[in-house]
């Protein structure tokens, strides 16, 4: 049987039979794949603990007709073990994993940017230098950008007129000028819009100095933007701690 080797982040696992698991991974070069890890639930398994969500691994698998079969695994970084007892970081990480799976709907479709973004997001959670909720929102905005859905937070999303503008539309692609605003558009705080732009661009000095009310308003806009484009809600997103 042909084999392949790659780096990957474990996104999800579920039981198969008495001792096996199906592992969903996002790989660096081969996109999202699903593979069977045989005997992984037995206490004698050589790599059971290495195939847990949040783990960055170097693995090898046989290519199957529907599911690959894992035969070698080495841990590169066990991110989850470093924040398993921290609810805000854990739930933010769960939302990252779920988002990644939703943003890679086609199996084996290469998604190197999403892979690097996920690894960077998990590292940021481990480092703990920024609020986990903002790390998540930055990750979500950049995931949307990779998917071709980057909202505009300055110039008008319809005509490109220089901003900033007062009006904001989820379905309209972001900021809208007076000429192109429509009924039902939102009018978020200018500081909130500034924060959203900072999260998308990586201006952490500005983001870290933001106030709680602006962070919460920004989170609501990000969640609505994600739901609009994915056409579904994330199960993990309501569990994220937004208290800070």
Image: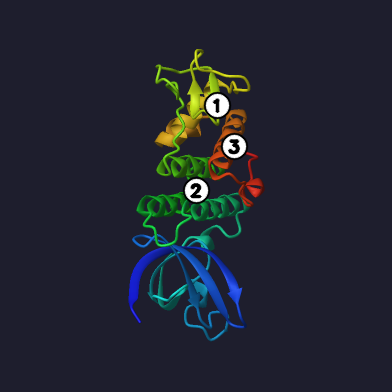
The C terminus, quarter of image: top right
Pick out the residue farthest to the bottom: 44
Instruction: Say above or below: 126 vs 243.
Output: below
Q: Secondary structure at mark 1?
A: strand
Which residue is at a point 55% across and 54% down the rendered structure image?
98
Q: CA distance from mark 1 to mark 3?
A: 10 Å
**What is the distance, in whole Å, between disc 2 and disc 3 at their CAs?**
26 Å
Residue 102, position as x, y percentages in the image: 52, 52
Residue 17 x, y percent position in the rendering: 61, 81
Q: Residue 56's image quarter?
A: bottom left
The first of marks 1 and 3 along the sequence is 1
Give the structural element (helix, strand or loop) at label 3: helix
Give the labeled residue for mark 1: 169
Q: Observer-nearest residue: 51 or 23?
A: 23
First in sequence, mark 1 or 2: give its number: 2
Discs 1, 2 touching: Cβ within 8 Å:
no
Whether pointer 2 and pointer 3 mark residues with C-beta atoms closer than 8 Å, the reply is: no
Q: CA distance from mark 1 to mark 2?
A: 32 Å
Q: What crowding class fits label 1: few (fewer than 14 Cα within 10 Å), some (14-19), or many (20 or more)? A: many
Label 2 vs label 3, nearer the camera: 3
User: Where residue 147 sits in the image (x, y, percent)?
Assistant: 43, 44
Kindly identify which residue carries mark 2.
Answer: 128
Return the mark for residue 224.
3
Asked if the residue at tag 3 contacts the one at tag 1, i.e. Cβ–Cβ closer than 8 Å, the answer is no
Q: Earlier in the sequence, mark 2 or mark 3?
A: 2
């Amino acid at each position: 049987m042909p084999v392949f080797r790659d780096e990957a982040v474990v996104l999800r696992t579920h039981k198969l039979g008495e001792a096996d698991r199906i592992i969903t991974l996002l790989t660096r070069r081969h996109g999202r794949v699903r593979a069977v890890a045989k005997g992984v639930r037995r206490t004698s398994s050589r790599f059971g603990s290495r195939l847990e969500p949040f783990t960055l691994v170097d693995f090898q698998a046989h290519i199957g007709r529907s599911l690959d079969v894992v035969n070698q695994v080495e841990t590169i970084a066990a991110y989850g073990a470093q924040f398993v007892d921290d609810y805000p970081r854990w739930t933010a990480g769960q939302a990252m994993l779920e988002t990644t799976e939703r943003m890679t709907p086609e199996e084996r479709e290469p998604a190197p940017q999403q892979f690097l973004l996920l690894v960077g997001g998990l590292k940021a959670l481990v480092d703990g230098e920024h609020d986990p909720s903002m790390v998540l929102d930055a990750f979500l905005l950049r995931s949307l950008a990779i998917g071709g859905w980057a909202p505009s937070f300055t110039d008008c999303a319809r005509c490109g007129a220089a901003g900033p503008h007062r009006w904001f539309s989820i379905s309209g692609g972001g900021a809208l000028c007076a000429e192109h605003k429509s009924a039902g558009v939102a009018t978020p705080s200018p500081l909130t819009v500034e924060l959203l732009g900072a999260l998308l661009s990586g201006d952490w000095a500005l983001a870290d100095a933001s106030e709680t009310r602006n962070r919460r308003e920004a989170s609501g806009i990000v969640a609505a933007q994600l739901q609009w484009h994915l056409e579904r809600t994330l199960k993990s997103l309501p569990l994220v701690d937004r208290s800070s």
